[in-house]
Amino acid sequence: MVMTTLFMARFPSTVIHRSWNDSIKQGVCSEEDVLPGRLRVKRRARNLYRRLHRGFFPSVSDISTSPPPRLSFTKPNILPTPNENHPVMSDVARSTTTEGSPRDPPSVLTPESNTTIQSRGKNRAPLLLRGQFDHHVQPVLPRRMSFPSMDFLSCYAIAVNEVNAAGGRIVTAPTNGAAGVLPSVLKYFLEFISEDPENDTMTFLLTAAAIGMLYKRGATISAAEGGCMAEVGVACSMASGAFAACMGGSPEVIEAAAEIGIEHCLGLTCDPIDGLVQIPCIERNALGAVKAVTAAQLALSGDGVHSVSLDEAIAAMRQTAKDMSSKYKETSRAGLATSVRGAKISVTVPDC
């Protein structure tokens, strides 16, 4: 009996996971440049994936190896005076005036715009200083945050929803318009965190299904009834709870993660431009996936005790859906659907 139960759980989870993986691969492998429809939305998953360099589908990770354009470096005639009252800029100024510094050579790039760019080493890009040294607010060092794993998370979600927008094969989870959240979070977990992919896949899918059932019975998973909070919001809640379960969270922590996932999506409207599941749906799935992981991390950092229970959040969602105007329920009669120039086509019979 136990083996039969495990087989019954493993087989559908394997099929679903394979379908999710195929839809992600189809999205990042697509050779099409734009999505169908008069909006002419550009596909981004392929370029996003290739930009990340270390892809998990080798056939599409071939980055162009052409050398970057060479820059000419010259030494400036006048160097900025160190400001001892500004610790960051004083360090920068000292690094430019100190000869033979092993970390920051004194070479700078001086383009026609009179903006000084300091070289930061052989393998690092030049540093652009924004601002003027004679101003009481000293120039600001540019900062670029890079989280490759989180970039993959967004890329996966965008890939699935581009496949959906192009009429490709996806898995409804919980709807077509929100089909990118769960696959992206699961693949993110398997590729960057998991040590037991088979068991984690079953845990993720079964937990997500249990949470989704609560929304189906207690509220709705249709944007035509509850706006986008019923689609991307529910998907975010399902993914955050499933992520917490795979991380070894207790039932209380899993519930807290699912509640955080939906709590901050309450009132989210569904107002697709031209009635197409493209804008803002594709990007919204990427944000939903990132929010799901963040919600799970918040729950895992606590003790499972949360001010709002999941049942209370579902009840609030149900009431919000009842009070929400039909203009914001997939009918494209308000919001972005009407504020964007040229987007005036309303969907009289919403169908998700």
Image (cartoon, rainbow, N blue to C red):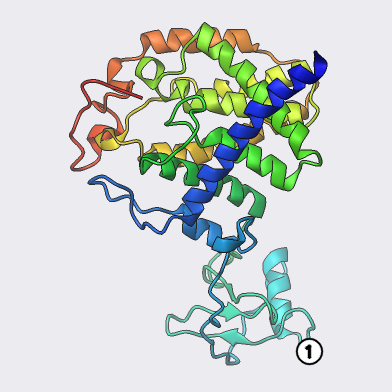
Locate residue 328: give its quadrant: top left
| Residue drawn 49% across the image and 13% down it | 317
- Between 346 and 5, the one lying in front of the other is 5
Q: Position of residue 131 (x, y in %)?
A: 52, 68
Quadrant of the frame with the N terminus? top right
Placement of 210 over or under 114, stated as above or below: above
As drawn, 150 above or below 11: below
Residue depicted at x 63% and y 27%: 12
User: Residue 339 at what x, y percent from top left?
Assistant: 24, 36
Foreground: 352 or 26? Answer: 26
The correct choice, above or below, for 58 with respect to 99 in the image is: above
Residue 257 seen in the current view? no
The picture places residue 50, in percent across and down from the top left corner, at 54, 62
- Looking at the image, residue 233 sits to the left or right of residue 344; the answer is right
Query: Visible in this render: residue 19?
Result: yes
Q: Which residue occupies 36% across, 25% down? A: 352
Q: Which residue is mark 1?
A: 100
Q: Position of residue 187 (x, y in %)?
A: 64, 42
Left or right, residue 246 beside residue 292: right
Q: How many callouts does the rendering have? A: 1
Crowding at dot 1, Cα within 10 Å, few <14 / some 14-19 / many 20+, comes out as few
Tell me which amino acid carries mark 1. Answer: Gly
Quarter location, residue 107? bottom right
Q: Secondary structure at mark 1?
A: loop
